[in-house]
Amino acid sequence: MNAGGDSTVDDARRRVAELRELIERYNRRYYMLDDPEVPDAEYDQRMRELEELELRFPELAAADSPTRRVGGAPAAAFAAVRHRVPMLSLENAFSDQEVLDFDRRVRERFPRHSAVRYSAEPKLDGLAVSATYEDGAFVRAATRGDGETGEDITQNLRTIRSLPLRLRAADVPRVLEVRGEVFMPTAGFERFNREAAARGEKTFVNPRNAAAGSLRQLDPRVSARRPLEMFVYGVGYVENGNLPDSQGALLAALRRWGFNVSPEVRTVESIDGCLAYFRRIGEERRRLAYQIDGVVYKVDDLAMQRELGAVSRAPRWAIAHKFPAEEALTTVRGVEFQVGRTGALTPVARLAPVHVGGVTVSNATLHNFDELLRKDVRIGDTVVVRRAGDVIPEVVSVVPERRPAHAEPVALPAVCPVCGSPVVRDADQAAARCSGGRSCPAQRKEEIKHFASRRAMDIQGLGDKLIEQLVDAGLVRTPADVFALRFETLSELARMGEKSARNLLAAIETAKSTTFARFLNALGIRDVGEATAAALARHFGTLQNLRRAGEAELLEVVDVGPVVAANVAAYFRDPVNAAVVDQLLAAGVRWPPGRAEARGGKLSGRTFVLTGTLDGRTRDEAAAAIAALGGKVSGSVSKKTDYVVAGKDPGSKLDKAVGLGVAVLDERAFERLLAE
Ligand code: I6G
């Protein structure tokens, strides 16, 4: 039943009971067992449905409803700690409109303000904790628990190196309780899971779970070995001390006292600033070292915060603006196998369409057959699907509780679903492959798509659909055939006018002039991506040198190991490949010295960071221009950064660069540096 429908009280009562039971079960799995049963989005949806029903039918409200809780119940093994000031949780907003409504409610309370100043910061996907200091010494820590009472995790929190055990500043209140989020940075989480899997131990489904599971270890020595960190975002109980009068100043004081405060915190002048902040952080979130699920806005003025107060369990002066959920539940309707450029068979789950990460998803990758077996995905299963940013949606896990009796295991096909050649499996590789090579149309298509793609030969106008048409018509079999295409043939293709044909031929002509690294990347040698292609180009300088190189010589290249060395040598030994390379050269593909990779180029050894948008180049183009001159582009600013290139609407990287004294180039200065 939907909360907005025409339900009777009886229907509502039944649904409310059902939801409460379900949510309590999710709570147990999540908070007590650190083993969530469903994605957060599913949990939030159920909670919202229950909240809406309780609002519409006040007679169904109950003191023990999960909507009255803030977190989970404390586990028995830890001592209970009563919070002297309740630890609230935040109201969530899932749309700009809900954020604007929040701001309107705030302004209604302060009619003289046409705009309210807010403090904005990322919302970490971690565990809320409180840490108390007396006379500057760390004495106690607790989880949020149900908001009134949490668990004593003093010994566990003590192991987090970024938490100060002593505060030395003269203006620290005698008793100071700080609140913040404990989290596991993404790299540490991935390393931890890799190592746990190698030992055959339990892995965590996400960094938040890993943080919670690590902190709630009865043996603090276990917590100590986990890569945990903490950001502080506010204060709770304070005795004998004066606090600043704004959130921004409070965070600055906390930072001065020795706490880790998010470097992304910003003060903005109005709710529009909040929304702009949300978009910027949304774009940059993949580059952060930790996972976040939204941003938090707080009324900056602490006196205004006090006046606004709280409703039941959430402050009226703060709201969490959540990114669209990146995980959702759906069912598997079937599994098909796609054939890639090197023949690798990728199982793809066909799904009942589901809204996730802001789009409707009906296909998700299972990566390879071993992964499918490991996750034990069967047709009919309910699965967790994840779509993070622009990454291809993937099946994360199966919900075993929801497996129907008729769920059907998936078998690896014996022959290629496209060309019928036998499927082979290398003993030491997860991938199963079609053995057809270039005789398989799927492999031919993928090879040409890669060859023509933007980061390879960059043939504009030669898109996936057209390539499929050309291969199906037998007009293109190898990359070299692209350069033999003629106007008469092209203009007769369906959906191809004379003008498009002429444009395409011009683009093919332009693409003949490339760089050695792009050319190598375009060949699609197994395991040779952009970075390895660039390293090979730099090391060997000429194609002739590379073609002559044996495996021993190839191993001298930085980042080239035995597998890549063997693949490169095998590629050039193969007479068919050798013929394709010769045909490409004969067709006029070349890398003029002006476009050559800068072996010892003038930017060699220089590290750049890009922020904001440039008028003249996309970010990829700017990065390519830097790389072509031997420079390196990094995602984050540090003392090792040589230049930060700041375009329009630069992000926090610009502030960081200024803070560290790193040289900042505007677009004109950057272009001058490239052209010099
Ligand atoms: O759970 C939370 C995460 C982050 C918070 C929070 C926060 O600020 C950045 N702030 C408050 C006031 C509360 N929970 C209650």
Image (cartoon, grey):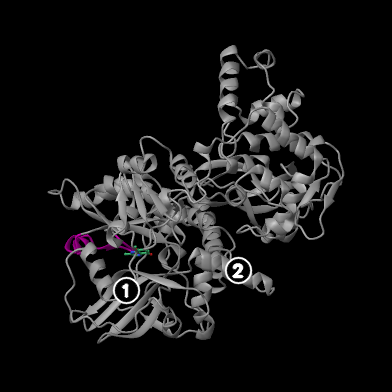
**Left or right of 205, for residue 281:** left
Q: Is residue 134 visible?
A: yes
Q: Inspect the image, locate mark 1, and give the three-letter code of the amino acid beneath it.
A: Phe
Which residue is depicted at the point 71% across and 48% down? 526
If the image is split into quadrants, where does the C terminus sit? top left
Residue 489: image location, x then y, percent: 70, 15
Span colored in magenta: 301-315
Direction left: furthest residue: 112
The residue closer to the viewer here, 222 or 195, is 195
Residue 316 location in percent, x, y?
28, 58
The disc at residue 193 is 2
Q: Residues within 10 Å of mark 1 (few under 14, many from 20)?
A: many
Query: Which residue type does callout 2 highlight?
Result: Asn
Q: Nearer the viewer, residue 210 or 575?
A: 575
Residue 201's x, y, as percent?
Answer: 66, 74
From the viewer's side, name the closer residue of 108 and 526: 526
| SS for dot 2 | helix
Q: Residue at coordinates 45% horizontally, 50% vertically from top-left?
A: 631
Q: CA distance from mark 1 to mark 2?
A: 28 Å
Q: How many discs mark residues in the rendered view?
A: 2
Q: Tell me what residue is drawn at x 71 percent, y 41 percent.
A: 341
Please give the label number shown on residue 195: none
Q: Is residue 118 rendered to the left or right of residue 157?
A: left
The residue under label 1 is: 259
Callout 2 crowding tier (Cα within 10 Å): few <14, some 14–19, many ≥20: many
